[in-house]
Amino acid sequence: MKILIPTPLRQYSDKQPAVEVEATTVGEALSGLVARHPDLRRHLYTEDGKLRAFVNVYLNDEDVRYLQKEATQVRDSDTISIVPSIAGGR
Amino acid sequence: MEPASRRFAQVSDSPVHATARGTAHRIANEVSPLGQHTLDRIGNTPLLRLPRVVSEHPGVELLGKAEWFNPGGSVKDRAAANIIATARRNGQLQPGKILLDSTSGNTGIAYAMIGAALDIPVTLCMPENVSVERKRILHAYGANIIYTDPADGSDGAIRMARELAAKHPDLYFYADQYSNDANWRAHYHGTANEIWQQTEGRITHFVSMLGTSGTFVGTARRLKELNPHIRCVSLQPDAPFHGIEGAKHMPSAIVPRIYDASLADANLEISTEASYAMVKRLAREEGLLVGISAAAAVVGCLQIARQLKKSEPAVLVTILCDSGDKYLSERFWEEG
């Protein structure tokens, strides 16, 4: 499946706008992503391993918060997007 | 207070009005209208003391400009009002033109509010992931919104506004808050002098978050003229991917043309989590429900207070950009 990387984080994903991972849940997909690009970890997770409060994860067009969060099942054809809850600049 | 009907009756019964109708008519035309226009309430915000959060640093006074007292609810009323006034004065914003800019929220709200009051149509480019509250406020004021890809953040909105402005120069006045000198000048002529007067010249440190950088640049530039010893400290998020509304991580963003890094005696980095925690702390310890960037500014002030020599007296002044009501749907309220 595909994970879309937001512009400010692409410097930590070798400039790639999207990363392909194999996973059965959202949590696994994100673990796969940070395993491949370890610099992303501190931007997405707190020190105790929780997703940071402003990091929103969408499965296709749905916020996983309103699905089964990181346990949400995924298929190969799905796309995950990582989006900050509020944007920078005024 | 007597009823209005009785006061009117007295006026019309008055011999002056009864016998010299012409004079009375002339006087009525010269008398200024009652009340204030909502736009006259922009600026001159209160300077609030934050005694409890700074209590472990004796000798340090922490003060914040309560910018949510502006009619549009944020510091951005100042820049937007001056940008619009300047453009109307120099003919860039003539009747029939649409004001266009990119914004992730507060500037848009300010443009939309002022535009509604002055009958100026407003079109805003903004990332689709701005909070629902903001979208609804802009809609309420009647602004036209063009949403851009959330993944591109505020820089995506900037690019969209630039494109539209280049394509339709006759249709739009591109306000360009990131490059418009009227932005920082609003703070040079307003915010800085207010702080100087409200602190009776005792300010030792000015601390402000960087967004467009207009608040920091304009205020610091003027304060340094009034007293070159005032230390001006700019703050920015500690990472390119952050949750501090309105703030810019300069090393990874499109740097605003009006930004002048040389005005800063120091630049501190603030974490999103520390800002969230401070939002809650200010609400519960000071009774101040402020927004995330206001809380981030207070985090920066406390960092400075910790670095001061013990019992070194200091008057720290910062900008509390807006109140917390636009952020009540954020997830951090449910966590920690």
Image (cartoon, coloured by chain):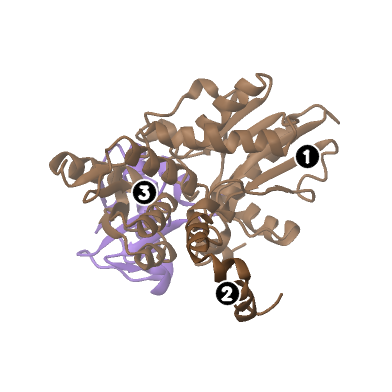
Q: Colour of chain A?
A: purple
Determine the CA span between mark 2 and mark 1: 55 Å
Whether tag 2 and tag 1 are in contact, CB under 8 A, the answer is: no
Residue at numbered disc 3: B103
Dot in front, 3 or 2: 2
Q: Colour of chain B?
A: brown
Seen as rendered, the residue at the extreme front is: B19
Q: Write down the residue under mark 2.
A: B12
| SS class, disc 2 | helix
A16 sits left or right of B20 in the view: left
Identify the residue under disc 1: B61
Viewport quadrant of the C terminus of chain B: bottom right
Q: Chain of mark 1?
A: B
Mark 2 and mark 1, same subunit?
A: yes
Instruction: Look at label 3 and name its amino acid.
Output: Thr
Amino acid found under the numbered disc labelled 1: Glu
**B196 displayed left or right of A58:** right
- B82 or B250, nearer to the observer: B82
Q: Is residue B324 above or below residue B65?
A: below
The first of marks 1 and 3 along the sequence is 1
Q: Quadrant of the N terminus of chain B?
A: bottom right
Seen from the viewer's position, the closer of residues A32 and B9 is B9
Q: Label 3 lies in what chain? A: B
Residue at left offset 40%, top offset 73%: A66
Image location (x, y in percent) of residue B218: 51, 31
Q: With respect to residue A72, does A22 lie above or below?
A: above
